[in-house]
Amino acid sequence: MNTPAFKKETFRDDYTFRNSPEAIRRFPFPFAEDEYMYSVNIEQHVSTNPGSVFEHAIDIDEHYIAECEDRRLTLERDPTRYIALPHMMDAQWDMVELIMESLSADYPQWFELTKNGDQWHWVNKPLEIDQTFTFGDTSTLPMEPFEYISRQVQGDWIIMDHRDDDLFADMGMVTSQADWSIAFDAGMSFKEWHGPVPQANEIGIFDRALKYLLHLQYGSPVRRLNWTMTVNPRLDTSPEEFPLWGPDNASVTPENVGEKVHLRVELQALFRLPRSNAIAFSVRGYLISLDELVTYPKWAKRLRRVLTNLHPDLSEYKGLDLYRQTVIDWLEPLEDGAELSLGTQPE
Amino acid sequence: MQRGYWIRSKPLYDSLVWQTPAVAHLVIAGGEGGIAVLKLFQQMYPKDPIQVLYTDLATANKNYSDILQQIVPEELELCDSEESLLNNLEQRLKDCTMGTHFYVAGSEAFMWHVLQKTRAAGVQDVDVQKELCGTLARPVYCVHCKTITRDVHHNVFPCSNCGRHLFVRDHFSRRLGAYMGVMVDAEEPGNIPQIEEVYP
Amino acid sequence: MSILNVRVAEIEQVTDVVKHFTLVEENGRPLPRFSGGSHVVVSMNINGRIHRNPYSLMGSPENTDSYHISVRRQEKSRGGSVFMHDGVKVGSELQITYPVNLFSLSKLGKKHILVAGGIGITPFMSQIADLNRLGDDYEMHYAFRSAEHGAFVEQLKQMCGDRLHLHIESEGQRINFQNLLSNQPLGTHIYVCGPEPMVNALLLTAKDLGWPKTHVHSEQFLAPPIGESFMVQLAKSNMEIEVPGDMSMLEAMEEAGLEPDFLCRGGACGRCEVEVLECDGALMHNDHYLSDAEKASGNKIMPCVSRARCQKLLLNI
């Protein structure tokens, strides 16, 4: 992958976030067909397509520094976006290991990890961090191990404890979520946590997904894509801050839709953790404005078709009702009715 | 509400039934939960030791201390407030052993306060029998200011701490013992739907 | 499924029927970290036929230089354990799966009671290492036939100190489950691994004393039973295979070149579950995974341990 220059940009207030042409090209467009159904669509999280967001276990892109800074701001306003129930300490260290090993192996130009037994030395050049600590000894880090490392990585992380043939969301760093709250959902079982998703329980999706995840093996992570839409490139669309971003949903007009409305795709990856036997669920969000997205006509046409066919329950659940039609209308002139190739590739 | 709809994160509440075999039974009730205790004692009850903890509640339409005192043939402790009941429970849990069965009855807010105590003692929520009595009032957690308003009867209500008008989302946290409340007029300030009593 | 290539670095005769194998990565690299109670599945090539048996990892999970497994010689079985005893030497190369944990400690437990019978001690060895590291409260109860059958007793004494309770049957020391399970504080979890009658007796006592199921954990990997041969039709692969008497359906499918999913190969985890499309005789369910109702419905089967007695069996695989 080409070394991106890390961008200085914001995800709030003046919203200076933009994608470079390279970031648009590698955007994980989620719709392989003209119709969208809620499904599990899980595949092995193995390295595919050099340069794509699937190349590495944890993707670092041009927005890395800005996203870490946005997380810092969110935590400063509201520390409850991070939670770790007391029985999750082994999982905290598992996460330190997973993130440090993965980043240092995949991006040696930015991250370095040196181990001498339990003495670890971690260097994060983009964030200018240089830390020596004793693995397993919390007192040698400036904060809890999982909070420490999850402040240095993009995307949200939810760590699920595996017990009684179920998975419990007992730990998380969640600052860029699509309208759910880890402070509220912490401790929930898999199905309680997914309770609000419409159209899914009825078709048995969560039973099958849970059974699949209970059998997830260390060394064989899996992934899927999920999506929603957001007005303004805002990472923190939490229920906590709904009073801040809620009014934006009513601000979309035919004139500003291309700039304001963003497709938000979540690359969700699941890793079994070795010490704790817990499962790490990473939800990495990618934002793209409609103006950026329509630089590829195939994506423009396909998005219009998906939104037109979307089940009303899912539209409501994803919070699209106030502006979905405006988006469809704005995309209309780009529609020529042509049959589109299957698959998510831009052309 | 549509057919086939339910709150998937919400536990099912049932009628209390003695669970056997067991080594002991601990029954905890508040306010209108007293009726569930009376119903329990109309069933053939087990030979193992039974303890009942009960408190009248000011918010309840009917309280049962007097009648429980006459009718419950086993060890009964009447507490004078929910707080003293919870303290009493915490002490008793230290002496309970594995094989003790737990029963709780009352409003949703009361039950989940009790369950926070039993959970801290190592009892899993699923292993406690629960009966909802007297009211459908919901404890609601304000996701904005993080306070819980107890006994909410309306679809939309002002948060007892920050005053925002909250819509009660159909999502329940057992850890917090509350439903999620989210500001109802955030998208269009001042646009508050008609307020109705939906949890009498 | 991720596979590790390992070499046997050391073999120790622990008792007259138990051997302890030390496995290292073929190129000397560290092996994956794991959690207490995990197992690996070892592949053995016995006269051209691949046998796969699950064995608990019994070393400390913190030691990634080597894995440790112990094998009890089972004369009346299909040959895997005999091969491990007679055919595997220091220097032998084996393939194993990544560790999988189907017998983990409950992290909510305030106290843990571990109960082992005979070779059932193995999964507890790694759990004890975790409990010691975390400083958790536990008791280890270990029952075996006679002093010479008490594998790893010295090691356990060192690891557990006075938390270890030995029950030597030849000296009349049977575990009294009634006493063990009475008067335990709230939040206690119990774990049992050993011969089936012992496991069943403990589960029954726990039930009689009102223990909730969520606090009672057992691990029983069954060896695939030997039976009569039968034919299976595989709908998706469009083929018909014979399952010989000394082979499981899962093994017969693998022999035929298929790669069905599996984790425990002992009827415990449910990973290899297959849908039964048609059966004109009787399914012989031997697993612990399917509920009685599921077994009765005849729609599913666990090919790792279950068999059939019929003319026609059609599976959706």
Image (cartoon, coloured by chain):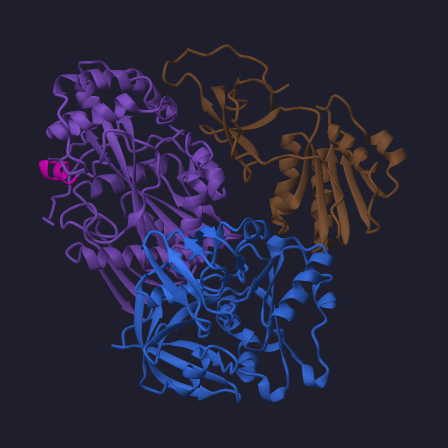
Chain colours: A purple, B brown, C blue
Query: In the picture provided, is C53 more to the left or to the right than C117?
Result: left
- Residue C21 highlighted magenta (yes or no): no
Residue situated in front as seen by the camera: B73 or A35: A35
Q: Residue at x 63, y 24 (%)?
A: B136
Magenta extent? A20-26
The residue closer to the viewer here, A314 or A121, is A314
Q: Residue A4, percent across and down?
A: 12, 45
Please state the horizontal and vertical placement of residue A190, each as a whole percent of the image.
46, 43
Residue C253 visible? The answer is yes
Residue at the farthest front position: C311
How many callouts does the rendering have? 0
**Rendered image quadrant of residue C199:** bottom right
B100 shown above or below A293: below
Magenta-drawn stretch contains A21:
yes
Q: Position of residue C68 (x, y in %)?
A: 42, 77
**C230 left or right of B42 in image:** left
Q: Residue at image x 77%, y 33%?
A: B80
* Residue A142 showing in the rendered view: no
- x, y percentage for residue C256? 32, 65
Image quadrant occupied by the C terminus of chain B: top right
- Frontmost residue, C251 versus B184: C251
Asked if B59 appears above or below B85 in the picture, the reply is above
